[in-house]
Image: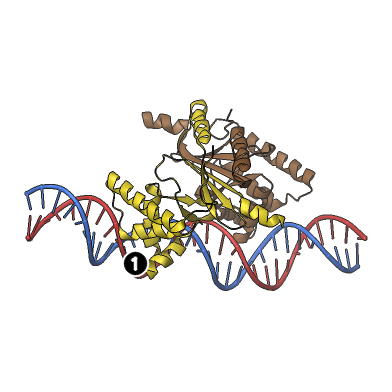
Chain colours: A brown, B yellow, C blue, D red
DNA sequence: ATATAAATGTAATGTTATAACATATCAATA
DNA sequence: TATTGATATGTTATAACATTACATTTATAT
C-alpha cells in the first residue's frame, strides 16, 4: 500500500527533467506562473533526494544570479509548497521536492537518520482515520503532516556488516 | 477510537497537580531526576493547553529564579520530551505537556488555528500502518510525528454565529 | 501606452536553537 | 566522610531559521 520514492534506484537526470516538465504543465493548467527562480528552486530540490534548508537553496539561487537575501528563497519555496510541488519538513526546517505532485496527497515524510535522505510515502489509510476523528470529536482537520524518522534499508544493511 | 484531551472542559488545577505527581512517580520508577527546573517547566506547560515556545517557558523559569539563558529552557524541555512527559510541536516550534504520559504513545497533535489550543489524540491504527510499511519498504521507523492543523469544535461553533 | 497586479529585490530585524565552556550538585564508594 | 565521577545548572557567544517593510522591476490586460 505505501508507495515510497527516494530510497530506490532510478535514472536521476531523467527524473529531474520529467518532474520539471510536469510542474510546468501543472502551473500552466492552474494559471500560476512558474517563473525562472521558482523553476530553479524546484530543480535544486529535485537534484537531491534530501531536504535542503532555505539558506542552502538560497546559496544555489545566488550562484545563478538571483537575489541573495532570504526572502528570495522563502518566497520561491513558499510557492512550491503552496502548489504541492514541494513539502516542508518540519523536523528539519527544510524542504523536499514532492514525489507525487499529481496526486491529491497527505504526504508521509520518511527521514533516514543514517544517510539523511528523505523519501515520501503515500498512505491513504491515514487520511480516512483522521476524517473519521472529525466526526467523533468535532475537530475539523485542514491539513496533516506525518513525519517519520528512522533508518532506510540501505543504512540498515550497512549497519549489519 | 481517538481519545482527545485538551478541547474538553475539566478541573484544571486538579489536572495539573495530578499530572505532576504522575510525572514524579514515573521519573522515580525510571531512576531519572525530576529536578525543580524540570518540574517547573512541566508545570508551566500544564498550566496552558497550548503549545509554548522555549523562550516563553524560559521567561517563566527566569521569574522563578532559574537561569535566564536559552539552554536552561531547552534542556528542561528536552528532558521532558525524552521522558515522554511533553511533546515538541514541530509546526509551531513549541512544546505541549503530554496528555497520556503513562501510555506508550505515538501522539497525534491537533492544532486549532482559531484559538491556538493544542490537543492530543491517540490513534493506534496509525502505528500499525507504519509498522506494516517497514515490512514492505525496508524503512525502519524509530519515531513518528503526526500533526494536524484545523478548527476545534468550539471555534467551529463560534464561526457559525 | 498605460494602469494594475504580481514578482523580485534589498535592508533590517526578529525568532529559534546550539556549541563550548565554567560551576555546582548528587550519589556511590574507598 | 572525603573523594571522585557523573549529572545538572549556569553563562557567553553565535549559528541557523524566518519575517516585516519597503523599493523596483516585470508581466498582463485593457
Q: Position of residue A28 (x, y in %)?
A: 78, 45
Q: Residue at 73% of width from left, 49% of height from top?
A: A34
Q: Position of residue A130 (x, y in %)?
A: 60, 40
Q: Position of residue A160 (x, y in %)?
A: 37, 29
Foreground of the two, D27 or B55: B55
Q: Residue at 47% of width from left, 51% of height from top?
A: B88
Image quarter of the C terminus of chain B: bottom right
B158 lies left or right of B75: right
Question: Within 10 Å of the Cα at label 1, are there few (<14), some (14-19), or many (20+) other Cα atoms?
Answer: some
Element class at badge 1: loop
Instruction: Count the marks.
Output: 1
Residue B45's place in the image compared with A85, above or below, is below
Residue A68 in view of the camera: no
The quadrant holding residue B57 is: bottom left
Q: Position of residue A27 (x, y in %)?
A: 75, 45
Q: Write down the chain letter for disc 1.
A: B
Q: Residue at 66% of width from left, 52% of height from top?
A: B156
The quadrant holding residue B65 is: bottom left
Residue on which disc 1 sits: B66
Residue D20's place in the image compared with A11, above or below, is below
In the image, farthest residue toward the top: B136
Foreground of the two, D10 or A14: D10
Foreground of the two, B48 or B69: B48
Image quarter of the N terminus of chain B: top right
Residue B138's place in the image compared with B98, above or below, is above
Residue A127 in view of the camera: yes
Amino acid at each position: 500500500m505505501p508507495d515510497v520514492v527516494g530510497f530506490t534506484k532510478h535514472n536521476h537526470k531523467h527524473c529531474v527533467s520529467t518532474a520539471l516538465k510536469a510542474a510546468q504543465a501543472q502551473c500552466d493548467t492552474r494559471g500560476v506562473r512558474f517563473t525562472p527562480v521558482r523553476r530553479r528552486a524546484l530543480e535544486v530540490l529535485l537534484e537531491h533526494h534530501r531536504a535542503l534548508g532555505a539558506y542552502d537553496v538560497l546559496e544555489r539561487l545566488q550562484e545563478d544570479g538571483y537575489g541573495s537575501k532570504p526572502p528570495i528563497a522563502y518566497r520561491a519555496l513558499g510557492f512550491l509548497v503552496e502548489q504541492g510541488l514541494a513539502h516542508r519538513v518540519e523536523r528539519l526546517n527544510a524542504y523536499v521536492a514532492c514525489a507525487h505532485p499529481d496526486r491529491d496527497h497527505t504526504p508521509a515524510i520518511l527521514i533516514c537518520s543514517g544517510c539523511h535522505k528523505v523519501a515520501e510515502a503515500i498512505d491513504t489509510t491515514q487520511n480516512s482515520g483522521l476524517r473519521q476523528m472529525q466526526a467523533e470529536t468535532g475537530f475539523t482537520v485542514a491539513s496533516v503532516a506525518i513525519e517519520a524518522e528512522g533508518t532506510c534499508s540501505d543504512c540498515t544493511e550497512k549497519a549489519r556488516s
